[in-house]
Image (spheres, rainbow, N blue to C red):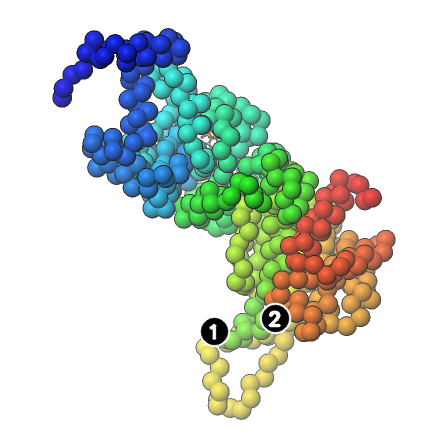
Amino acid sequence: MASLTVRQLDDKLKKRLRLRAAKHGRSVEEEIRTILRAAAADSDEFAEATGESAAAGARATARPNAKRVLLIIGGGIAAYKSLDLIRRLKERGLAVRVVMTQAAQAFVTPLAAGALAGERAFTELLDPQSEFDVGHIRLAREADIIVVAPATADLIAKMANGLASDLATAVLLATNAPVLIAPAMNPAMWSHRATRRNLGTLAADGVHSVGPNAGEMAERNEAGVGRMAEPAEIADMAMALLARDPEKWEPVFGKDHAQSNKGTPGALAGQRVLVTSGPTHEPIDPVRYIANRSSGKQGHAIAAAAQAAGAAVTLVSGPVNVPDPPGVTVVRVETARDMLRAVEAALPADAAIFAAAVADWRSADVHGQKIKKNAGGMPELALLENPDILATTAQRKRGRPKLVIGFAAETQDVVANAKLKLKKKGCDWIVANDVSAEGGVMGGDSNTVHLVTESGVDSWPPQSKDAVAAALVKRIARELKGDAS
Ligand SMILES: Cc1cc2nc3c(=O)[nH]c(=O)nc-3n(C[C@H](O)[C@H](O)[C@H](O)COP(=O)(O)O)c2cc1C
């Protein structure tokens, strides 16, 4: 390799270098190293010329003007999935840089993360090599988005409190880029009040989140909400955030987004909200089931609006074709009995909104094999009543959410029936909507609702389901704050 000394450079260049080095308080050699490092990081040509592209580098697969993701890996068992996440991000044409916490290095090595990213993984805050040019600020500035995966309970707590005690938290505090967290932890840690509170703070600060999902935990015999979202889900969410036009941001929540029509940002910070949505399917045999026309649009819109207002939201959804709202924990169920189980598992909650159209009845016999058409005349369909999820929750002696809201889908005497339902179920509010076929509410995008409470009936004008959701969330926030004005 040819060697080049400072003396061989022309005088003008030497002078500029000296001035630049003095300005940054470095030696001329250090300044040159800094410039070369920055060039190596920024230039595809450089990466190719130095063979870095062969190391499956982020730059090698990233498009010329690739957006840059800074992936912070926290110290949780799901850290192994973050190696796959690096690949998923790069598959989407993003350049990936990795920062690892000390605890993360007990789960995966910086070598593996660096090899996949194509650049060494950064681990130290007080590292003279990285910090002679204030590396943590550079890492923060050079990212178009920061993804924290897994976001441990510890990292979430540090972020919520603005700590900067290691490289990961210092970068997070120094960045202006959007931040997406993918929480992953044991279900007890996830539902702990402290974690809820911290998540509420992060939501109010404009931090986005994806997952966690429900499922089996790494610990034996443990299941519940706490599994990190799948790498592809996280990568898709990062892409969606990067694709947004900042001028027209209608983001999930946060301080920059006061104009969002999805609710009042931060109004539900620190609150836990449970929403049910969609129909239930009650099997008759392996191919047939009892169902209804609910699309899930209204329930999903409420979950999205509550999340936009900063709540930690669990959405228990029957089978629907609408996408999961970002940043919401989604538990998918099929039958009414599954839905009740999922609702009970998701408690405690501060508010529970039961927008699902739960089937009132299920088949008394669920046949193991498909019922044949001509096997002895018409089959009898005996029905059993399903559990009443709204009433069960509203009448809980312990752990009743402060606010329990039911939906009434009526085709006649909408308000009168809603008033009766309010009393019978023991809930606090009923959102009554006319679902007769001519209104097109079931499956449609708009809704006309009447909010029935102890103190009266509020009839809202016809509006989109998103607008109904935003208005309802606003009312819920007021109620939970004890301000019913
Ligand atoms: C085997 C093992 C698995 C762990 N998994 C998790 C986890 O999934 N989520 C979590 O929040 N903490 C988990 N922890 C605890 C964290 O490692 C610990 O809180 C650590 O301080 C997190 O550091 P960090 O947030 O700086 O990466 C685990 C600990 C051990 C020993």
**Which residue appears at 55% of the width and 85% of the height?**
379
CA distance separating discs 1 and 2: 18 Å
The amino acid type found where label 2 is placed reads: Asn
Frontmost residue, 380 versus 298: 298
User: With 187 as the anchor, is 125 left or right in this view?
Assistant: left
The x, y position of residue 215, in whole percent, is 48, 50
Q: Quadrant of residue 451?
A: bottom right
Dot 2: few (<14), some (14–19), or many (≥20) neighbours within 10 Å? some
Say which element carries label 1. loop
Q: Can you tell which mark lies on residue 292?
A: 2
Q: Can you tell which mark lies on residue 286?
A: 1
**Which residue appears at 68% of the width and 40% of the height?**
267
The x, y position of residue 254, in whole percent, is 60, 37
User: With 481 as the anchor, is 112 left or right in this view?
Assistant: left
The x, y position of residue 188, in whole percent, is 55, 40
Label 2 CB less than 8 angstroms from ligand 1: no
The amino acid type found where label 1 is placed reads: Pro
Frontmost residue, 342 versus 197: 197
Dot 1: few (<14), some (14–19), or many (≥20) neighbours within 10 Å? few
Of all residues, the one furthest to the front in this rendering is 12
Q: Earlier in the sequence, mark 1 or mark 2?
A: 1
Q: Is residue 231 above or below residue 42?
A: below
